Image (cartoon, grey):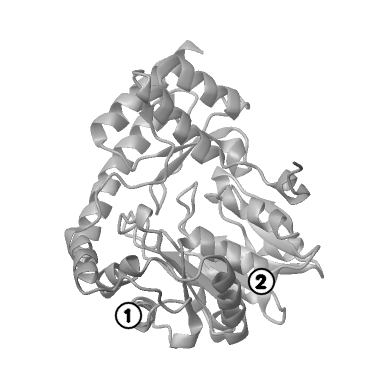
Amino acid sequence: MKIASRMENLSPSVTMAITALGRELKAQGKDILSFSAGEPDFNTPEIIKEAAIQAIKDGHTKYTAVEGITETKQAIINKLKKDHNLDYKLEHIVISNGAKHSLFNLFQVLIENGDEVIIPAPYWVTYPEQVKYSDGVPVFIETDDSTEFKITAEQLKAAITPKTKILLLNTPSNPTGAVYTKEELEAIAKVLVGTDIIVLSDEMYEKIMYNGKEFTAAAQISDDMFQRTVTINGLSKAVAMTGWRFGYIATPNVDLVKAMIKLQGQVTSNVNSITQHAAIPALEGAADETIEMMRVEFEKRKNIAVESFNAIKGLSTIDPDGAFYLFINIKEVTNDSMKFCSDLLEQKGVAVVPGLAFGTEGYFRFSFATDLASIQEGIKRIKEFVERH
């Protein structure tokens, strides 16, 4: 049996692989501390779980419309209006099985052979893989600590070619926690005026903000940006609903929405009907108090982790304004992040993700979406490892 050649261009997820290895070693009885997964350690808020139970009792267990039930789509519309003063209609929303599924649908219906997708690096591991699978060409714009891992308008302008189809923005960022300010987004928006470039704005971590900073959605910058932006979001991170698989897109481009529905209708059909009903209170703000509790706890962990890492000779990290990751600079120690992370796991039982997986060598990603005692012990082991090497 010959596997289809399209699979040869698809690489496995390094983050998933390291997380799985960590679990396997732990199951073998080894003392493993894992900071590799992008998953909150908190449980889903009770009010959301109760809504799911009630949905089952009420018999909401049948197929729904491919793009989602009206009530949940309306809750998304209301959320986008309340949070960002954006006006969408029911025909502008598609609910998918997590934001990863939303992205896959979008790339499949947008990209034709040779189309270029501009992706700032470091990037979430899934972006370039899905672009390549869709016969597109990832075009990377390199960033580093000096710009807080954010691209400039000048860099964007230099990267645009006649083949540029999409600009992919991720704010707050996985893996760096970088957040684009309103002014930075305005500068990017000016570069795009007069082009046909679509902006895919992945805003999954928008509710997890720190340092008193406010989040700005790409679509709210201007009418021009609203028309060209496809907002991608979900409930996995901020509402601790990773396993529920709820993502969505919002765009005024009705033709794009229809194409996504056509594709999804032949692949997965609707998102789990129970999840759709459980999502409504999350979108309407019923869990906001719990979300804020989680955010405050994440910020406490972040502050301790940032101070602790920056106190280790040879390591450094910026203080991120969002998400729940630190992107640790190890260039004074080594430029081989794969070996660093492999040796760290083998010798000290600490699982982190090499920067190479995110397209940027000389770093590793550390998730602080776990309890403080584990974070402190993990950093202690990393310090010992670095000092030994």
Comparing 239 with 313, the one in front is 239
Image location (x, y in percent) of residue 159: 74, 61
Image location (x, y in percent) of residue 147: 56, 50
Relative to 125, residue 188 above or below: below
Comparing 140 with 5, the one in front is 5
Residue 187 seen in the current view: no
* Residue shown at the point (54%, 43%) measured from the top left: 145
Residue 318 seen in the current view: yes
Q: Amino acid at mark 1?
A: Lys
Q: Which of the 4 image quadrants contains residue 302?
A: top left
Q: Residue furthest top?
A: 388
* Residue shown at the point (62%, 84%) measured from the top left: 255
Q: Which of the 4 image quadrants contains residue 46?
A: bottom left
* Residue shown at the point (45%, 22%) measured from the top left: 313
Relative to 362, residue 84 above or below: below
Label 1 sits on residue? 82
> Regarding mark 1 in the picture, which secondary structure is present there?
helix
Q: Amino acid at mark 2?
A: Val
Relative to 230, residue 138 above or below: above
Label 2 sits on residue? 109
> Regarding mark 2 in the picture, which secondary structure is present there?
helix
Comparing 62 with 93, the one in front is 62
Quadrant for the N terminus in the image: top right
Image location (x, y in percent) of residue 93: 47, 79
* Residue 204: mark: none
Q: Which of the 4 image quadrants contains residue 162?
A: bottom right
Structural distance between the alpha carbons of marks 1 and 2:
29 Å
Comparing 212 with 46, the one in front is 46
Image location (x, y in percent) of residue 242: 37, 53
